[in-house]
């Protein structure tokens, strides 16, 4: 089942204070970016944040789940937290702070 655009719009609005937020649609699902770092996936209308030590400290243990079959576990953020803009922003900021910048793409010659 593909994620709804309205879900992605809501989530990006909730975390807008974390930095430069954008999303990219991929195969009916979405990747969320913060300051050009992929920080989360929205799959089946569920939010999966990349696992980091800081993110685990905020989210707590026992919240790991794969966003799609065969994927490594991410931090599954319960919808119970989605309305808490401050909490959501904090999770995204702390996660982004631990992730490296993406490697520059090689130019085709």
Image (cartoon, grey):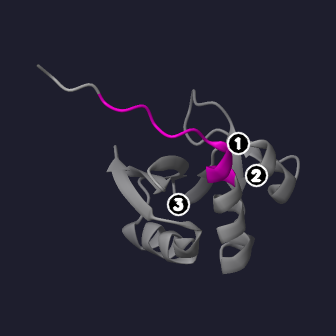
Q: Is residue 81 above or below residue 63?
A: below
In the image, taking residue 85 as reference, residue 87 lies left or right, namely right
Residue 41 placement (x, y as % from top left): 52, 50
- Horizontal and vertical percent for residue 43? 51, 51
The dot on residue 51 is: 1
Q: Earlier in the sequence, mark 3 or mark 2?
A: 3
Look at the numbered disc 2 and give the secondary structure of its residue.
helix
| Mark 3 and mark 1: Cα distance apart in space | 19 Å
**Residue labelled with disc 2:** 55
Q: Which quadrant holds the C terminus?
A: top left
* Mark 3 vs 2: CB contact within 8 A: no
**Disc 2 residue crowd, few under 14, some 14–19, many 20+, Cα 10 Å:** many
Which mark is first along the chain, 1 or 3? 3
Q: Which residues are magenta?
A: 95-105
Taking 82 as reference, is 56 above or below it? above
Residue lying at the far top in this picture: please name it.
109
Question: Label 3, on which residue?
Answer: 45
């Amino acid at each position: 089942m593909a994620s709804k655009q309205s879900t992605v719009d809501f989530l990006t609005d909730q975390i807008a204070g974390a930095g430069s937020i954008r999303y990219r649609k991929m195969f009916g699902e979405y990747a969320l970016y913060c300051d050009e770092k992929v920080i989360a996936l929205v799959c089946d209308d569920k939010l999966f944040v990349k696992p980091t030590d800081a993110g685990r400290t905020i989210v707590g243990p026992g919240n790991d789940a794969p966003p799609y079959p065969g994927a490594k576990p991410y931090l599954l953020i319960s919808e119970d937290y989605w309305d808490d803009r401050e909490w959501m922003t904090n999770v995204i900021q702390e996660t982004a702070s631990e992730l490296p910048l993406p490697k520059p793409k090689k130019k085709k010659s």
